[in-house]
Amino acid sequence: MKRNKTYSTKPEDIKRESFVVNADSKVLGRMATVVARILWGKNKPIFSPHMDCGDTVYIYNAEKIRLTGAKEMQKTYFSHSGFIRGDKLLGFLEKKRRDPRKILYLAVKGMLPRNSLGEKILKKLRINTGQLPEEIKAKGFKEVNI
């Protein structure tokens, strides 16, 4: 009796694509999960957790992202400088005012593996404020509907 062989994804089997996501009035967490799955390649049948099977994702209109409920007033972002009493707490609205791209970046980063593979995957994420640049529009990437 002949047995089936277990398939293992090889780097030459991976076909890369590029996707565009409009963040206008999208909920932060729901959008970040979809983007993280595309970046890691979990939406493909050849997904393998130890390889980078994912695609490039361009997000635009990052300043128009939203949160549900009262989280817009309650959510805080913590960072530390490494020095004594060097902790910083910023609210969502203040963080959004300073750099709205960082909010999306941190949300997607938290959904990826915390190792060198996660760093490699995260390099394929591009976040813009405002409309999509003309050079990206000209390339004809796939639009992701969330």
Image (cartoon, rainbow, N blue to C red):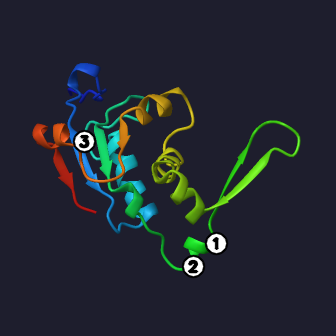
Camera-side mark, 2 or 3: 2
Residue 70: image tag = 2
Q: Residue at x 75, y 39 (%)?
A: 81
At numbered mark 1, what does the secondary structure look like: helix, strand or loop? helix
At numbered mark 3, what does the secondary structure look like: helix, strand or loop? loop
Q: Residue 27: x and y, percent?
A: 41, 67
Farthest residue, direction right: 84
Q: Are marks 2 and 3 in contact (CB under 8 Å)?
A: no
| Quarter of the image that includes the N terminus | top left
Residue 110: image tag = none
Q: What is the spatial separation of the Cα atoms under label 1 and label 3, in whole angstroms?
A: 39 Å
- Which residue was labeled with disc 1? 74
Residue 133, by quadrant, is: top left
Q: Residue 29: x and y, percent?
A: 46, 62
At numbered mark 2, what does the secondary structure look like: helix, strand or loop? loop
Q: What is the spatial separation of the Cα atoms under label 1 and label 2, in whole angstroms?
A: 6 Å
